[in-house]
């Protein structure tokens, strides 16, 4: 890999960040369903023992390094490549954007990721109903937060890491038939983001391994 090249086992929000910042990268697909999930293979476990995507492999001082977990990857990219910044200048504003990110990345996504949904089904529940319930419930809280800080995007009128975190979760909401009419601010923000080239290029349906 060149100095400006990264290898990523993908996730929507990480791809969106790379595209937004104009960072070159290599894309390696990990099929989360095929053969019981390629993330559980011994090959991938050597990259991330947690068997989760995303993972970002970089060259650092001639040594290959791996970074896992979405927020750690996003923060690294923001620090390493400050161009097209995704965090505000003001410290309080930066903290508020990070708060939105964590509410989504820690408070919504893990409750309806693939592992949890498979366990719900294994225990006799409906994974679709569970996912829709979780997203609807947490989006109600998120909508209230956005009333205080949103503009064109999640935080004012510039794209931030909060937008990068939000749009994949809206993608999931659509998958599970959540009524987004209940969330006018979330819907409006995502409509604006969907017009941006970085988010179009990073959309799951536009990836080489998309079914």
Image (cartoon, grey):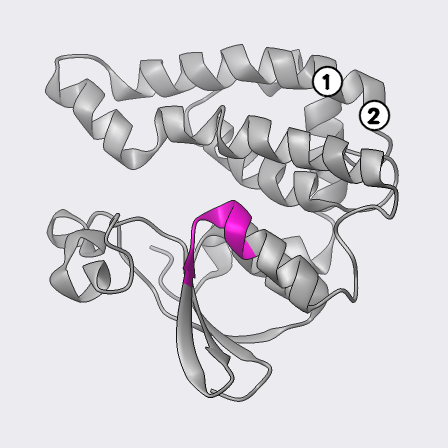
Residue located beneath label 2 in the image:
149
In the image, 123 versus 105, the foreground residue is: 105
Residue shown at the point (61%, 53%) measured from the top left: 75
Q: Secondary structure at mark 2?
A: helix
Q: Quadrant of the C terminus?
A: bottom left
Where 19 sits versus 102, above or below?
Answer: below
Q: Secondary structure at mark 1?
A: helix
Q: Quadrant of residue 207?
A: bottom left
Where 45 sits versus 62, above or below?
Answer: above
What is the magenta range?
67-73
In the image, 23 versus 194, the foreground residue is: 23
Residue shown at the point (75%, 31%) measured from the top left: 96
Residue 23 seen: yes
Image position, residue 93 (x, y; %):
83, 35
Residue located beneath label 1 in the image:
145
Q: Quadrant of residue 140?
A: top right
Residue shown at the point (20%, 12%) measured from the top left: 125
Tell me: 149 left or right of 171: right
């Amino acid at each position: 890999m060149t100095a400006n090249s990264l290898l990523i086992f993908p996730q929507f929000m990480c791809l969106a960040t790379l595209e937004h910042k104009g960072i070159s990268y290599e894309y390696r697909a990990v099929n989360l369903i095929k053969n019981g999930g390629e993330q559980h293979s011994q090959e991938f476990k050597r990259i991330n023992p947690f068997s989760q995507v995303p993972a970002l492999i970089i060259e650092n001082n001639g040594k290959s390094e791996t970074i896992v977990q979405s927020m750690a990857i996003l923060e690294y990219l923001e620090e390493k490549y400050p161009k097209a910044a995704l965090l505000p200048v003001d410290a309080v504003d930066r903290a508020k954007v990070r708060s939105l990110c964590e509410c989504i990345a820690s408070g919504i996504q893990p409750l309806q990721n693939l592992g949890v949904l498979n366990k719900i089904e294994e225990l006799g529940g409906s994974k679709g109903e569970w996912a829709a319930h979780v997203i609807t419930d947490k989006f109600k809280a998120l909508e209230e937060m956005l009333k205080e800080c949103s503009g064109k995007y999640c935080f004012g009128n510039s794209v931030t890491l909060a937008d990068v975190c939000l749009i994949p979760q809206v993608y999931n909401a659509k998958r599970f038939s959540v009524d987004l009419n209940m969330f006018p601010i979330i819907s409006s923000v995502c409509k604006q983001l969907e017009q941006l080239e970085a988010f179009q290029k990073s959309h799951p349906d536009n990836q080489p391994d998309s079914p």
